[in-house]
Structure formats: structure tokens, C-alpha cells
Amino acid sequence: MLIQIAEGVLVHQSSFMQTNAVVVQGRAGVLLIDAGVRGDEMTCLANDLRELGQTVVAGFSTHPHWDHLLWHASLGTAPRYGTARCAATVRDRLPDAAAKARVAGLIPPDIVEQVPLDLLGLITGLPADTARIPWDGPQVRIVEHQAHAPGHASLLIEERGVLVAGDMLSDVLIPLLDLNGTADPIEDHLAALRLIEGAAGDVDVVVPGHGSVGGADQVRARIDQDRAYLLALLDADVLSDPRLGPSAAFGDWLPGVHKRQLQHLARGRDRDGTP
Ligand SMILES: [Zn+2]
């Protein structure tokens, strides 16, 4: 089911990890951001679009994680984009069919059969520092940063007052650090929050990659909440984050991820001698 969140901007949410696909209406069709996860859900989205008389004219993946790189044949053959670093990472990590089998190993067993991998990661990298997604519709500004995954981009649709955050600013997930390939993942993530705050601190609606769509007050609240989590990690402080509570949406596994992030950072401190 497509839900309108702003004029000409709609969201289709997956039952898998509250993953949000975002549809932006353009002049000759729609831009589809992070298409979805399960095959039947993407088919449902394609049907909803058909009923609205819309076709997909462009796609965009916010970052190179499998759940943001999927596509379904029913959505058509529009060009699909990502940042240059996102596309380069996909090329590195998904060079061949064997890599797809490895991806299948990352998908929870209860849904792996329902996730179509044929069109996984078929994106074109936009030249580095491209400011906007090339398409015929409202301007979509690319706010690229170094956090969560290489080449991660949040997208700002200024005319509609909408921030499509990618895997940032979730109400159900703590900041998931990019622990590979960056020397200072916490400072990188803090810098990304500053960048987003500067570019999109006054939007009306924020759509996270996973979780619920938030209003204007939520943009500030989620930036603050993520910053508090990161600063607590930095100081190895005691943390009370509602997203890690036993009754939280992902309270059964997220505390384990938090623990691994803490351990990884502690190992880094041991290595370089910082207190
Ligand atoms: Zn991700």
C-alpha cells in the first residue's frame, strides 16, 4: 500500500524491518528510491503505480547494502543510480554470481526465498560530487557522507520538504557504524549528522530506510538521539536508548549489534593506545 507523506511523495513499507521504498512523482513518471525487499511487495508497488497511471523513470539506491539494492522486473527497466562510491562498492562486493550466493547467506532464512536477487545491484554510479539526481521531476539533492556504508547518500527533496535519510535517523535502529574501511567511524557518523542537520534540519518530513516516517519535530529529535548514542559510545558511557530496550521493535537482536560495535571500538582503542 502506498501512503502519501507529502505532495507527490509516497512511501511503500515492507514487512521486513520496516524498510521504506520512496516514490517521487515527476513529470513523465516516478523516481523510486530503495525499491523494497520482498518480490511480492515490489510487485504490489508496481501494481499500485500502474493503477495511478505511473511508470518508473528512474531508480536510486541510497547505499550498497543488499536490502537497498533490490529491484523487480515488474518495475521496468529505468536507469538505476547510486553515488560513484556506492556503485564502486557494489562492483567490488558483487562481482559475480558467487557473490550473489554470499548475499543470499546474509538474508534471514525465513525470507530469503521471497527476495529476488536477479536484478540486485544493477546501478550506475553518478559522477563524484553530482549534486542532483538526473531526472525530470522535483529536484532531489544528493547529500553524500561517510557513515553506515561507503557512498551513503541521504536525499533532500526541497520543494516537497522531505528528507529521505537512507539508513540514518531511524526511530527503530541505533546508528549502525561503517566499521570496515574507515579509521574513525564515530567521528565520520557525527560529521554526517552535522551535514544532514545543515542541509535538511528544517524539512517537514523525514523518511528513514527502516522505521517510521517522522514530522518536522522528529528530524531534530532523531539527530539528537543519534548524536547522544554516538557520544555515549565515544566515552564508553552508560547508555539509555529506547531503541535498545527489550520491548523495542528490534529489541531481540539490536542489543547484540550494539555490543559488537562497543567491542570493535574497544579493540581499536587498544590498538592505537588512545584511552
Ligand atoms: Zn544499510
Image (cartoon, rainbow, N blue to C red):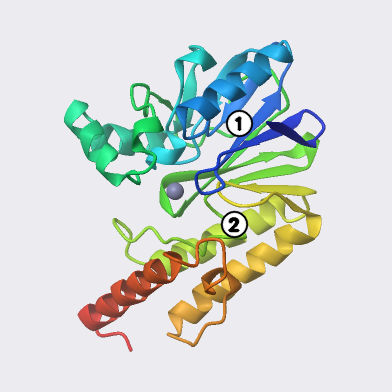
Occupied quadrant, residue 143 = top right
The amino acid marked with disc number 2 is Ser
Total numbered circles:
2
Instruction: Please say whether residue 45 is visible from this viewpoint.
Output: yes
Q: Is mark 2 on a helix, strand or loop?
A: loop
Residue type at numbered disc 1: Arg
What residue sits right under mark 1 in the picture? 132
Give percent across and percent down for residue 268. Answer: 27, 75
Residue 29 appearing in the image = no
Give neighbour class at mark 1: few <14, some 14-19, many 20+ (Cα, 10 Å). Answer: some
Q: How far apart are marks 2 and 1 (CA)?
A: 23 Å
- N-terminal of the two: label 2 or label 1? 1
Quadrant of the rendered image containing residue 224 = bottom right
Q: In which quarter of the image is the N terminus?
A: top right
Along the line of sight, the residue nearer the viewer: 97 or 26: 97
Task: Mark 2: give few (<14), some (14-19) or many (20+) Cα within 10 Å.
Answer: many
Is label 1's Cβ within 8 Å of ligand 1?
no
Numbered tag placed on residue 182 in the rendering: none
Residue at left offset 45%, top offset 15%? 73
Q: Which of marks 2 and 1 is in front?
A: 2
User: Residue lying furthest left in this view?
Assistant: 98
Q: Is residue 124 left or right of residue 98?
A: right
User: Which residue is at the front of the view, 230 or 145?
Assistant: 230
SS under mark 1:
loop
Residue 170: assigned label: 2
